[in-house]
Image (tube, coloured by chain):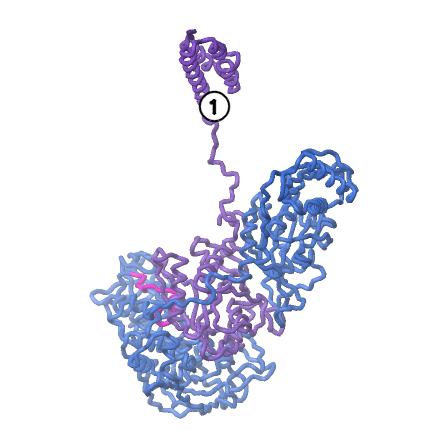
Chain colours: A blue, B purple
């Protein structure tokens, strides 16, 4: 809603209230301030003058020479506009004045005639867009006076947001009503008396549909289509409404002023009864914008003789519109159903100032007032006559009182609000109410659709009391410093991986089908009904592709990349075991390690990292789509599948044009809990000296080193052990594996003999069990 | 009684010590001056031949000399080692201005860090983290939250739907978790729910189809509007600092009433909107079957917004492009 201070002044006296106070008031009433500015004349030294003589230019056909009286003197001015006659009152830029954009006006020779400045158009003075000619003023502008002082040329402008529940504040009247309560001032009453001289020619009928509860009209005869008054043009143009003519402008004016949309028909183009009904399926109507609209049974239309002439509340029809030739009008003022108007305007993508007001709900009792307000904007003379109002309103149920216990107010707001404050606030807002003992009752005003329940009234009271005037209290919840498993697991992995220098990423959840199918050809992806674009038609079934994309993006854009991880949901269309009706979604950790040729094999690095951060983890080799045939593993904990890790297949590496081998992993976090992750059993420390063996074996390529280590652990299970691979070297068909064993007894110091016995036992067992040979041993 | 030229011995020792170039030489010096072939040892051998009186005097003298030699060698040796190491240290230099690990950040994504910080603030006053699905039913995202089916928010231009009857969608707000949580848990409830939400917007400087919110919900027997104020003022102080000014202005959300927006006063004097909140609408509590004695409040805060404010990040796109130059800064 766009507001001018001078327009608000019609409804509430703001003379002792400055702009800052007004801004504070608007904001505290819930109107978010989106824009605020001062309006000042964009011109200097413009004088009001009267054209007293016009004669042809001796050397030019397209311009005329005028004599203009500016009070104390008469000047000769050359003028190119033809829209005025002798006697016209006009704004004059004499030499040494400025029009818009600080353009200086001086004496100028125009084809041999000296022009003493210029006569100005509205757009040259930056008032409004009007290029038809110069601005013609009315008699209220005094000849010789300073133009900028002849009207309110300095003003303040606000653009405020009105929340969707407050349709009643989509007008000056509505905003002023709120302000009058805030500032404790009276809301001015603007009377618009009617003195009809005619009987209406046409009948109106609001029809059978409940979607129109009131259809009223007034007929006006013998108007001439011309410019609106200066004031109307000033006000409308400054709130961004395009100036058209005295019919269109005045309907727009009433709409912004009091919130009642009006529609003007050329009465002479109408025949029969004007009525309201739902459109028939496929019925057609040519709207004002000259488009043929095909309607359906949800659309509400205005008809005459049962033929569509307008889309109710949304747009008028082309065939009945007001043109420059129009002399007789029928002005419609109706109440249409909110939801119906909303559906039609959205469906046809026709959103207008009128439709927006209907869909938020206009005052149910303001239709006649709208017609009176419109009629009174004309300077009536003997020629212009108007009819009485034709009213076809349906009986609506009168609103009942809503009653509730007054203690509910304190219970919701946490503070006692004085009864006097409550009654005076409600009275000022024209909300009928009564407090009796412990209860309060109220009635919904015809413009307040948001006041249906006790809580609605409590909100109203709280808002006018001022949210910032309430005290603050801090309740403490149930679980101090316990975030719960979901968040703990997430934090655990973020902490561990960030310490390992993985960059955490966040990528969009959308992808293309083919990228899902690289890794999950057998999973049905979740398709988006209304995708943002073709590359975002599916939800991702895995995090792998997002990670590769990030890796590649940085490699290509920045010349370097790194290790990445992301924790987010992945989706597919299989059954969601937890929730009904929605696709399966798994909260998942994905991470990527590139092979950047360091000494450490990335697959071993990942396995060892996972062993470190997920206690009890084990791996089962299994080939998977998109991955290396051998270098691909299921990740298990206690025989439960928790994820997958592996090397990207060489084929995908080539297809995706990657220069390094990538290793990708995914872990389903919902399968884990922090208690499991934090388990690590204390191993008591032996106080006896250690003995140490370095053993090197010749082994098969496919031997799992861990099997050897486990075997040694078994043999030495009563000791404190540290058993590690210290070397793994493969050359052609041979492979050497070095194992370092450090062990201590919990009971004694081993002597030389025992030392040798243990060594022999280990070597004998390993060589026989695994069919390997000992290369060398060291101690 | 034999006479020994003590001065001469000590002078020769000093000379030897001064000529040392390697630490091992001290062992030889010890041997030469104190060992069994040393001058001192030679003199000791003479002792049995002396009178008791002389034995005592001369013996004492030799012992003193031995101690003096020992201490001279020892202190010189210590000094020599010290000098050697200090010389080595003086020759060593590290250019600590070289930063081999050029990533200045924490490796955590800024959105994760901000979410975690907000979660910690609320967990310190007793809120637990709850979560719910991102692909949701329209009922949980709209109807249960008092948003009727004609409401503009439900149009396909804003909401991403997953099936043609518009029954499933990508949640447009984390408020869905309120419903999910209350369906499964009895009151009292004190939860926060950080997570992803979705809108039908192309990714650009100011829009993203994906962004993050943190939802909060408190339902108990005696909660009121002043509690809502106190809780969110506690949050703004914890997050932005003790001196931050906060104000509440009326707003409208279908699922809360009264509803408010919270603004904080920024360094430049302007007021910036940081979250929406309100008392949970009675219809919402009714939709999940809570008894009338329970009421409470809820709020939703945009995580990107907090991050953008605090770190002066100007493009939403930065959060989702994963440009390593951006990631490394936080």
Camera-side residue of A614 and A401? A614
Q: Tag 1's secondary structure?
A: helix
Q: Residue A463 vs residue A335: left or right?
A: left
Residue B244, x across and y down, in percent: 36, 59
Taking the image as shown, residue A553 lies to the left or right of residue A380, namely right
Measured as percent of width and height from the top left, residue A772 is found at 77, 40
Q: Foreground residue, B55 or B209?
A: B55
Q: Is residue A31 magenta?
A: yes
The C terminus of chain A is located in which quarter? top right
- Chain holding disc 1: B
User: Residue A305, position in %: x, y?
Assistant: 53, 89
Residue A688 horizontal side relative to residue A737, left or right? left
The segment highlighted magenta reads A25-43
Q: Is residue A92 magenta?
A: no
Measuring 48% from the left and 83% from the top, which residue is drawn there? Answer: A337
Residue found 53% across the figure and 56% down from its top: A491
Up-down relation of residue A383 to residue B141 (above or below): below
Establish if A266 lies above or below A99.
below
Looking at this view, name the residue that lies furthest to the top. B2
- Residue A133 figure quarter: bottom left
A560 up-or-down from A156: above or below:
above
Instruction: Looking at the picture, tell me which residue is in the foreground, B176 or A167.
Output: B176
Would residue A589 be visible to someone looking at this image?
A: yes
Is residue A61 at least partly visible in the picture? no
**Which quarter shows the N terminus of chain A?**
bottom left
Answer with left or right where residue B295 lies relative to residue A588.
left
Residue linked to disc 1? B81
Residue farthest to the front, as pictured: B52
Which residue is more in the foreground, A463 or B51? Answer: B51
* Whole-percent x, y for residue B134 in the image: 57, 65
Q: How many labels does the image show?
A: 1
How many residues crowd mark 1 within 10 Å: few (<14), some (14–19), many (20+)?
Answer: some
């Amino acid at each position: 809603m766009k507001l001018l201070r001078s327009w608000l002044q019609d409804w509430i006296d703001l003379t002792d209230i400055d702009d800052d106070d007004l801004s504070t008031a608007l904001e505290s009433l819930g109107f978010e301030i989106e824009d605020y500015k001062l309006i000042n004349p964009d011109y200097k030294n413009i004088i009001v003058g009267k054209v007293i003589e016009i004669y042809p230019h001796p050397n030019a056909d397209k311009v005329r020479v005028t004599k203009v009286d500016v009070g104390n003197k008469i000047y000769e001015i050359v003028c190119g506009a033809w829209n005025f006659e002798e006697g016209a009152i006009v704004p004059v830029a004499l030499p040494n004045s400025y029009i818009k954009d600080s353009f200086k006006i001086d004496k100028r020779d125009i084809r041999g005639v000296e022009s003493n400045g210029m006569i100005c158009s509205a757009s040259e003075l930056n008032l409004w867009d009007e290029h038809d000619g110069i601005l013609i003023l009315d008699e209220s502008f005094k000849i010789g006076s300073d133009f900028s002082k002849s009207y309110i040329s300095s003003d303040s402008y606000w653009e405020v947001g009105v929340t969707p529940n407050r349709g009643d504040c989509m007008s000056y009247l509505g905003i002023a009503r709120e302000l009058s309560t805030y500032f404790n001032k009276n809301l001015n009453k603007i009377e618009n008396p009617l003195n009809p001289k005619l009987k209406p020619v046409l009948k109106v009928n609001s029809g059978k549909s409940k979607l129109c509860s009131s259809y009223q009209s007034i007929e006006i005869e013998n108007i001439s289509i011309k410019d609106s008054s200066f004031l109307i043009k000033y006000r409308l143009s400054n709130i961004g409404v395009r100036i058209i003519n005295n019919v269109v402008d005045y309907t727009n004016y009433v709409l912004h002023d009091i919130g009642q949309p009006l529609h003007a028909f050329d009465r002479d183009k109408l025949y029969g009864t004007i009525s309201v009904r739902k459109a028939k399926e496929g019925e057609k109507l040519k709207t004002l914008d000259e488009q043929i609209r095909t309607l359906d049974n949800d659309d509400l239309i205005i008809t005459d003789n049962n033929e569509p002439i307008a889309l109710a509340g949304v747009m008028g029809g082309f065939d009945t519109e007001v043109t420059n030739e129009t002399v007789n009008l029928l002005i419609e003022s109706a109440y249409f159903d909110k939801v119906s108007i909303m559906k039609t305007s959205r469906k046809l993508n026709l959103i207008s100032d009128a439709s927006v007001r209907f869909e938020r709900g206009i005052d149910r009792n303001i239709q006649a007032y709208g017609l009176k307000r419109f009629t009174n904007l004309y300077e009536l003379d003997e020629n212009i006559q108007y009819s009485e109002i034709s009213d076809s309103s349906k009986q609506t149920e009168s609103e009942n009182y809503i009653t509730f216990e007054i203690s509910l107010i304190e219970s919701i707001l946490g503070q006692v609000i004085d009864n006097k404050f409550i009654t005076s606030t409600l009275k000022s807002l024209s909300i009928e109410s009564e407090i009796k003992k412990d209860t309060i009752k109220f009635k919904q005003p015809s413009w307040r659709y948001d006041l249906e329940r006790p809580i609605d009234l409590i909100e109203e009271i709280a808002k006018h009391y001022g949210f910032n005037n309430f005290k603050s209290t801090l309740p403490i919840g149930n679980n101090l410093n316990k975030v719960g498993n979901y968040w703990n697991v997430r934090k655990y992995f973020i902490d561990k991986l960030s310490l390992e220098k993985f960059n955490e990423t966040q990528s969009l959840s959308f992808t293309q089908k083919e990228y899902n199918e690289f890794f999950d050809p057998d999973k049905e992806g979740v398709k988006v009904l209304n995708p943002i674009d073709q590359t975002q038609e599916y939800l991702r079934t895995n995090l792998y592709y997002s990670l590769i994309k990030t890796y590649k993006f940085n490699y290509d854009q920045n010349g370097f990349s790194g290790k990445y991880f992301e924790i987010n949901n992945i989706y597919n269309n299989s059954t969601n075991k937890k929730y009904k009706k929605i696709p399966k979604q798994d909260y998942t950790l994905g991470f990527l390690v590139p092979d950047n040729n360091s000494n450490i094999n990335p697959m071993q690095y990942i396995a060892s990292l996972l062993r470190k951060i997920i206690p009890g983890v084990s791996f089962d080799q299994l080939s998977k789509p998109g991955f290396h045939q051998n270098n691909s593993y299921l990740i298990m904990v206690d025989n439960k599948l928790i994820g997958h890790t592996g090397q990207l297949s060489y084929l995908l590496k080539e297809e995706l044009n990657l220069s390094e081998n990538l290793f990708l992993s995914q872990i389903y976090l919902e399968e884990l809990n922090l208690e499991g992750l934090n388990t690590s059993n204390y191993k008591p420390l032996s106080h006896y000296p250690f003995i140490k063996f370095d053993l090197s074996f010749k082994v098969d390529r496919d031997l799992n080193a861990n099997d050897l280590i486990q075997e040694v652990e078994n043999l030495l299970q009563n000791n404190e052990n540290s058993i590690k691979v210290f070397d793994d070297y493969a050359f052609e068909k041979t492979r050497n594996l070095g194992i370092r064993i450090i062990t201590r007894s919990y009971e004694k110091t081993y002597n030389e003999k025992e030392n040798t016995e243990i060594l022999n036992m280990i070597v004998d067992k390993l060589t026989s069990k695994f069919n390997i040979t000992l290369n060398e041993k060291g101690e | 009684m034999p006479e020994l030229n003590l001065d001469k011995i000590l002078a020769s020792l000093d000379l030897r010590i001064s000529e040392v170039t390697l630490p091992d030489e001290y062992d030889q010096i010890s041997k030469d001056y104190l060992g069994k072939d040393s001058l001192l040892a030679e003199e000791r051998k003479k002792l049995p031949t002396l009178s008791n009186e002389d034995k005592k005097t001369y013996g004492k003298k030799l012992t003193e000399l031995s101690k003096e030699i020992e201490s001279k060698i020892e202190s010189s040796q210590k000094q020599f080692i010290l000098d050697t190491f200090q010389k080595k240290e003086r020759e060593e230099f590290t250019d600590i201005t070289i930063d081999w690990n050029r990533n200045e950040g924490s490796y955590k994504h800024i959105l994760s860090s901000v979410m975690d910080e907000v979660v910690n603030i609320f967990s310190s006053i007793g809120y637990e983290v709850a979560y719910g699905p991102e692909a949701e039913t329209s009922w949980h995202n709209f109807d249960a939250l008092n948003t009727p089916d004609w409401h503009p928010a439900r149009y396909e231009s804003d909401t991403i739907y997953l099936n043609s009857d518009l029954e499933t969608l990508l949640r447009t707000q984390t408020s869905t978790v309120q419903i999910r949580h209350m369906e499964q848990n009895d009151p009292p409830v004190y939860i926060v729910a950080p997570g992803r939400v979705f809108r039908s917007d192309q990714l650009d400087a100011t829009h993203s189809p994906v962004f993050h919110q943190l939802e909060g919900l408190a339902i108990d027997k005696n909660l009121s509007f002043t509690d809502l104020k106190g809780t969110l003022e506690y949050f703004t102080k914890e997050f932005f600092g003790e001196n931050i000014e906060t104000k509440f202005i009326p707003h409208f959300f279908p699922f809360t009433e009264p509803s408010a927006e919270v603004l904080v006063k920024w360094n430049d004097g302007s007021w910036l909107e940081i979250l929406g909140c309100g008392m949970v609408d009675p219809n919402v509590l009714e939709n999940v079957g809570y008894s009338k004695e329970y009421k409470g409040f809820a709020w939703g805060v945009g995580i990107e917004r907090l991050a953008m404010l605090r770190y002066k990040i100007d493009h939403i796109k930065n959060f989702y492009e994963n440009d390593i130059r951006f990631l490394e800064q936080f």
